[in-house]
Amino acid sequence: MKKEKKPDSVVFDDETQTYHGALLPYASSVAAPKIVPPDITAWKNTNVISANNQFKARYENIKQQYREMMDQFEYNNLVYGAKYNFEPITGKVYHLYRAKDESSFLSLISPEECHFDHIGSFKLGPDKMWEKL
């Protein structure tokens, strides 16, 4: 007996001998509506711009933190490189002055009490880093 071939438009499973066009997740008939994937170009463009703005904001934040860290590094080098004959106490305010020979020295004397060339006032933090006031 010759097996009858079904037309291409008919969805028939030879193993189970059933029609299963209704069970398919896609259209199987020529008369079925066209499957059109959604256009997500606008969504992509909007989200790319949003993501780029977030990266730029994070970059600017990191850049600002780097500048602050480098300023703190310079202040620490300046104060630790100055002359002083005492052990600074954490939390106390000290004043940095420039001497006539262009060297710098650290003092407890405030700028109001003397007439030296005042560079800045600093406080020693608990992490032994100088903070400019």
Image: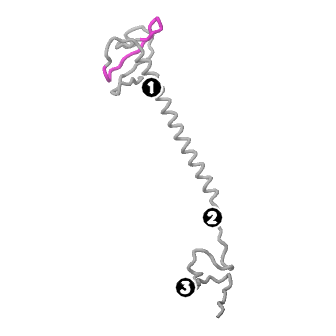
Task: Please name the residue that numbered disc 2 is placed on.
Answer: 38
Considering only vertical position in the picture, is 80 above or below 61?
above
Task: Judge the density around disc 1: few (<14), some (14-19), many (≥20) Cα neighbours within 10 Å.
Answer: some
Separation of residues labelled 3 and 1 (CA atoms): 78 Å
Q: Amino acid at mark 2?
A: Pro
Q: Which residues are magenta?
A: 89-104
Task: Please name the residue that numbered disc 3 is placed on.
Answer: 16
Quadrant position of residue 93: top left
Task: Judge the density around disc 3: few (<14), some (14-19), many (≥20) Cα neighbours within 10 Å.
Answer: few
CB atoms at circles 2 and 3 under 8 Å apart?
Answer: no
The foreground one among 86 and 4 is 4
Residue visible at 65% across and 83% down? Answer: 10
- 4 on left or right of 74: right
Query: Which of the two discs, 2 and 3, labels the residue nearer the N terminus?
Result: 3
Whether the magenta-drawn stretch holds residue 101 is answered as yes
Residue visible at 64% across and 57% down? Answer: 41
Q: Amino acid at mark 3?
A: Thr
Assign the C terminus to one quadrant of the image. Answer: top left
